[in-house]
Image: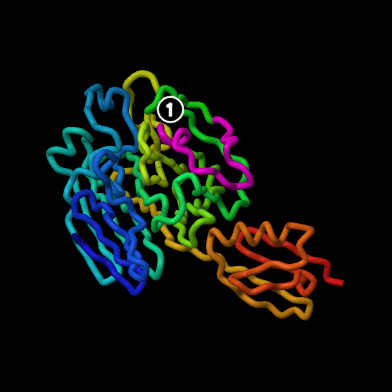
Amino acid sequence: MVVLENERLKVTIAKKGAELQSVFHKAEQFDYIWQGAEGFWSKQSPNLFPIVGRLIDNKHIKDGQIYEMNQHGFARDNDFELVEQTAESASFVLVENDETLARYPYAFQLKLTYTLKENAVTVLFEVENRSDETMPYSLGGHPAFNVPLNGEGRFEDYELHFNNNTLTDFEYHEMNPAPYVSGIKRPLTAVKEGKLKVDRELFGAGLIIDGQDGALQKASLVSNQTEHSVTIFMNDFPYLCVWTEEGVEAPFLCVEPFHGMADQHGEIGELANKRGIQLLEAGQKNGHSYQMVFDYQSEVQLTNKEGESSLHHVSEAGLDHLRQQLIDQTQAEFEINGTTYLKADLTHVAMENWTISFDSK
């Protein structure tokens, strides 16, 4: 195992699949990452490459030849080579071999770099096409988080908050018949005011939320029963899949940035024609990253009538409560981190993607 560590977190990564195994909160002695249990899904955070989701009959065609490849590809099942490590970063590499070429007839290098900084882990995928033709690929993260976090609250107490609740209109890619997509996008009406309740039935087949050409920037797993949270920053990933194990009361939730998705139901096809596929020219490289922030805090700026500003840091759970206090016309005051403020003293309050102004008379 490879260990990255700072004063807040201890991060453990396996060489097999370059898979994140643990993000451990040192002060409170708990793990954010699902550790597996008998009778449940056993993985922690597999890396998906060179496909995301299921192929029709687990097969694809290239130059008239049929190749077999299992769901989510083979990267998660292969040993990566550790090529670089510091106290707070580690890089792993996988290149083609006889086994991968039998499933995916391209020469490639996949480099995965984990970087730990304060309370955040950044995952960088670097894909190099080492073949002499255009290479189609998809990739994704599949991190599973303990729900409840630190044992606080129940599974049903948790929500996903999108872009600090400022993004409200969502579509999802219909799975029909699961595990394949139908090719149809539908409104995700379960999102209310930028919030989506954690729902086993809704997530059991995998809910693929469309990123709306970059409009979906982050998703936060939060509950009013805890100050702990996990926030996924999407960066350039266009889809977000939310999944928990179907048919059981599994105490985890996967929040997964995807570049790609399962085949559309129908005939066996070519990878190059899949929805969300990336096409990389011979000899070229692509980079994709996402970030997980543990106990993310937003900056909230208060400005008074004298033009003086003060900066405060508020947890993801506290941010929604603060917003409700501010827009409640019956409340003359509000509270941040245990301190009470009068609305009458302020001209405006600004936070990420959201501002409210008050009467400045």
- Asked whether, in this view, residue 16 is left or right of residue 231, the answer is left
Camera-side residue of 165 and 249: 249
The image quarter containing residue 87 is bottom left
Q: In the rendered view of the protein, which quadrant contains the C terminus? A: bottom right
Which residue is situated farthest in the top direction here? 267
Q: Is residue 300 above or below residue 195?
A: below
Q: Secondary structure at mark 1?
A: strand
Q: In which quadrant of the rendered image does the N terminus lie?
A: bottom left
Measured as percent of width and height from the top left, residue 200 is found at: 44, 37
Q: Position of residue 25 (x, y in %)?
A: 35, 65
Return the residue nearer the eye: 107 or 36: 36
In the shown orientation, is residue 128 left or right of residue 217? left
Q: Residues within 10 Å of mark 1 (few under 14, many from 20)?
A: many
Q: Residue furthest right?
A: 361
The residue located at (28%, 23%) in the rendering is 57
| Location of residue 2 (image quadrant) | bottom left
Determine which residue is flagged by label 1: 181
Q: Which residues are magenta?
A: 186-208
Q: Report if residue 326 is visible in the image.
A: yes
Q: Is residue 283 visible?
A: no
- What amino acid type should be assigned to the residue bearing mark 1? Val
- Residue 204 among those drawn in magenta: yes
> Could you tell me residue 266's position as x and y percent?
38, 19
Residue at coordinates 29% horizontally, 58% vertically from top-left?
A: 22
The quarter holding residue 254 reads: top left
Nearest to the observer: residue 53 or residue 329 = 329
Image position of 157 (left or right of 146): right
Picture layout, residue 53 above or below residue 147? above
- The residue positioned 74% from the left and 76% from the top of the image is 304
- Vertical arrangement, residue 114 with respect to residue 129, above or below: below
